[in-house]
Image (cartoon, rainbow, N blue to C red):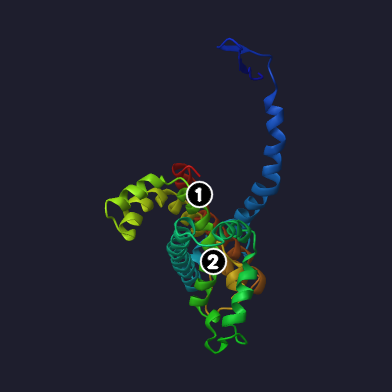
Amino acid sequence: MAEVVRRPRAGGGWSRSSPRPYRWVVLPPVLLLGLFFLYPLALVVQQSLQPDTGGTSLQPYADVFASESFRNALWTTVWIAVSSTVGCMVLGFVLALVIAFVPFPGAKAVARFIDVYLSFPSFLITLALLFIYGTTGIIGSFEFLATPWGVLLAEVTYFTPFVMRPVLAAFSQVDGAQIEAASSLGARAPRIVRQVILPEALPALAAGGSLVLVLCLNEFGIVLFTGAKGVTTLPMLVYSKAILESDYPGACVVAVVNVLISVGLYGLYRVVSRRAGA
């Protein structure tokens, strides 16, 4: 039975309008969603349950979970993602603080550039870092990018603006009268930041950090482009198993684990963003 829509009347209250077949309006988008997103994901899950020996079983999961390469990749993914997120949150908060509260020529232009920066591909930033830390770069003798710390630097450099954007938006809502009152009472800048500015920015900082954590967890281009030796994350392990080893069940198992972690973190990001009003 078609739903009946209630519309507000001019004099107040609600009136019943004619039935509309909303189910037919919703059906095409749902079908497209299932076709282009859910169906490929279902194929990945199905492939992860089909070992090379045939049949359907959890053996691919047991093999992958028992492998040292998976455990190392999971640990590497987690510590790089968490470290990059912490670095982005600290650096992003400090830079946003300077842009928002320290008057200097071109502050507005820098704030606008951050919006443009968010559209840059990750490999572009990594390429720029190669000119500094690469084997033929300015200080290339250190081969810095070919280490986990190089990957960490590249991710912090690229993802910091993703934290700065919501924090700058939060700073724009800070009441200047509170800052002036605290300053008139003799509070120094560090105390004003700690007691007045930081509490207002914490929800936005948490939302930006949650988003960066999800992005770092799934980052593939930076790790691949730096050519870091011995740095294998979950996305890199999927690539290695599928392309280099032709182990498609194993690659799908790692992909499913990566998706589950990402979805869980994305749910956390949505909760934090909703509380922050983002």
**SS label for mark 2:** helix
Q: Which mark is residue 53?
A: none
Q: Relative to 190, say whether 40 is above or below.
A: above
Q: Amino acid at mark 1?
A: Ala
Residue hosting label 2? 234
Residue 182 image point, x, y percent: 31, 50
Quarter of the image holding residue 175? top left
Residue 197 image point, x, y percent: 38, 52
101 and 208: which is toward the camera: 101
Residue lying furthest left in this view? 185
Q: Relative to 242, say whether 170 is above or below.
A: above
Reading the chain from its start, which is encountered first: label 1 or label 2?
1
**Whether residue 255 can be seen here:** yes
Q: Crowding at label 1, few (<14), some or many (≥20) Cα neighbours within 10 Å?
A: some
Residue hosting label 1? 169
**SS label for mark 1:** helix
**Whether residue 214 can be seen here:** no
Q: Residue at x 68, y 16 (%)?
A: 19
Q: Residue at x 70, y 45 (%)?
A: 35
